[in-house]
Amino acid sequence: MEHIFEFSNISAYRGGTRVFDGFNLTIRKGENTAILGPNGSGKTTLMKLISREIYPVHSEKSRMLVYGRNRWNVEELRSRLGIVSNDLQQEYGACARGRDVILSGYYSSIDVWPHQMFSADELEHAETLMGELGIEALAERPYGRMSTGQQRRFLLGRALVHEPEALLLDEPTSGLDIPATFHYLDTVRRLMRHGTQLILVTHHLHEIPPEISRVVFMRDGRVVADGGKQQLLTSGPVSELFECSVEVVERNGFYQVLPGSR
């Protein structure tokens, strides 16, 4: 089976801090996966490695492949993997109009620029995506004047312009209120039902949709557990992961945590 990600014996730094030392992780194509861990576990570094914002330490013993390759034509990769990160949300240009946020996905740029040209089909596709995401009324609103949830939906549309095979989402409902959270999760679930693979990086159990089958636990730059959702999303393993006593509750395929007994 083809793999989306293959990380073998990876070492990586952020600034002067070594985050990964011999990190290993493989995610197969079609395998909906949640990568769960506390702050400081290495999740952000993993996102930056995948998006090529940082690079691993070169070593003949290490390997970092995306869809089986270590070198990619950016245009080709966009059609296979869409990425929405917290850093992108924070750094995106405040003056960009909503429609242009979507269109910028064709060039992986921040806002659109005079030299960038869009076909009639691309312009129509952007309008269609805004309609599907319920944000067509915000097409002319500046990004900086949108709510957090509205920004997230536009960035999701930006990632979807190439109709990627898989989405990599970083804590997608962080900062959203309850209705916005439910709307975003419903949208992601609809995409999954239509065949889009989801790799979710988070520390929030409530973000994990029922369609996720595999859960990976990360702590201190290492994978500390890897298995089925029903096996790992229980009170004991989650308490150990976060080093905090919790009770995990499941309802209709969704999970939530409550304070555990001390």
Image (cartoon, helix red, strand yellow):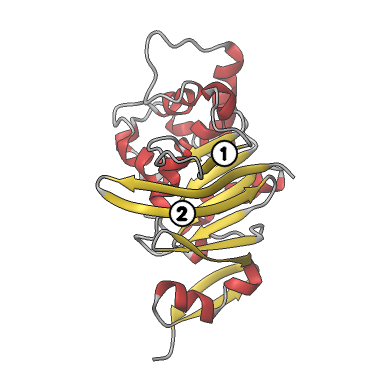
Q: Which residue is mark 2?
A: 22
Residue appearing at x 54%, y 25% in the figure: 126
Question: Would you say 39 lies left or right of 10 here?
Answer: left
Classify mark 2: residues with Cα within 10 Å, few (<14), some (14-19) or many (20+): some
Residue appearing at x 37%, y 9% in the figure: 114
What amino acid type is highlighted by mark number 1? Answer: Leu
Q: Position of residue 23 (x, y in %)?
A: 48, 54
In this view of the protein, which residue sits in the foreground, 248 or 99?
248
Which mark, residue 220? none
Is any part of residue 104 visible from this angle?
A: yes
In this view of the protein, which residue sits in the foreground, 16 or 208?
16
Q: Position of residue 226 (x, y in %)?
A: 59, 64
Q: How many marks?
A: 2
Q: Position of residue 89 (x, y in %)?
A: 37, 40
- Determine which quarter of the picture holds residue 196: top right
Numbered disc 1: secondary structure:
strand
Query: Given the current orientation, which residue lies at the most extreme bottom position?
Result: 262
Which mark, residue 65? 1
Question: Would you say 93 lies left or right of 191 here?
Answer: left
Q: Quadrant of the C terminus?
A: bottom left
What's the CA distance linking mark 2 and mark 1? Answer: 15 Å
